[in-house]
Amino acid sequence: MHLVIISGMSGAGKSQALHTLEDQGYFCIDNLPLELLNSALKTTKLVEHKKIAIGIDARSGKNVLEEFPKIVSHLKNQFKTDIVYLYAGKAVLIKRYDETRRKHPLSEADTTLRDTIIKEYELLASVREIADIQIDTSTTDIYELSSQIKERICGTELQSLSLMFQSFGFKYGTPRDSDYLFDVRCLPNPYWIPELRGHSGLEDNVKEWLSSQELVIKMESDLTNYLESWIPHIISSQRAYLTISIGCTGGHHRSVYLTEKLAAHFSKIYTDSIIIQHRELS
């Protein structure tokens, strides 16, 4: 049986993630109190399903949530279990609540929405720390989130490792869902070449220019060798997901180029388990 537990910040997309899994054939239960999780999984009717997804939120309370790592450790001894944690920036969550006019599930009469979001973030610390995959939904719409869930969860049920390579621009903030984050701002920048500035690392003229730069060639080689050395150890530790982020200043040239190069190299080793995302291009 494949068990997926979806948790994270209210307003970050948990319901949409569960809807996506339901469409993929998972039996879904939303907002299940954490203390009822073990009992629910013992029911004959539920365990008959090969694929189950359960939504857990902060309403289970601090004391119960602190026991979450023990509960998950027990579950992983019984089933293939993946923990997915969804989050977004405070300003984004506040904006979403303002737009939908929905009430936050932890809101109280004498507490601001901002303070409630901070409280929820603290309550979910034990979940966040052991999550197999974290997804920042600050800049994704429901379609992009659904695509990520299908690629990273449904598309890898039988695979040993799902590798995501993503490019980003430091000027827009670092992606917090990274397992490895590499800074390539030290490399020659096509932005300062007028005829290349408006293009991206996906285009031939930029790729040709970068591939001729000695430092870019060395960076690609060093990153490839490093990841080749350590990914097998990650697999042996039973990790199912790995996110590798490459960042340059704006996220359009150097990081895009190297992300594509690394993904192409490792796709020959980990066939059908490579995902590519260019945050600033999308």
Image (spheres, grey):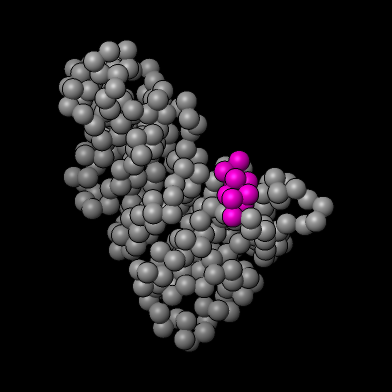
Judge by depth and name the residue closer to the eye, 234 or 104. Answer: 104
Give the residue at x 59% y 50%. Answer: 99
Look at the picture and state if 218 lies above or below 70.
Answer: above
Residue 28 within the segment the image draws in magenta: no
Could you say which is closer to the camera, residue 115 or residue 261?
A: 115
On screen, 48 above or below 221?
below
253 sits to left or right of 149 = left
Q: Position of residue 72 (x, y in %)?
A: 54, 64
Tell me the magenta residue range.
91-100
Q: Is residue 253 left or right of residue 78?
A: left
Task: Please say if 107 is above or below 195.
Answer: below
The overriding secondary structure of the stretch rendered in magenta is helix
The answer to whether residue 229 is seen in the rendering is no
Q: Residue at x 30, y 63 (%)?
A: 158
In the rendering, at what x and y percent does residue 69 appear? Answer: 58, 59
Q: Which of 101 and 209 lies nearest the eye of the viewer?
A: 101
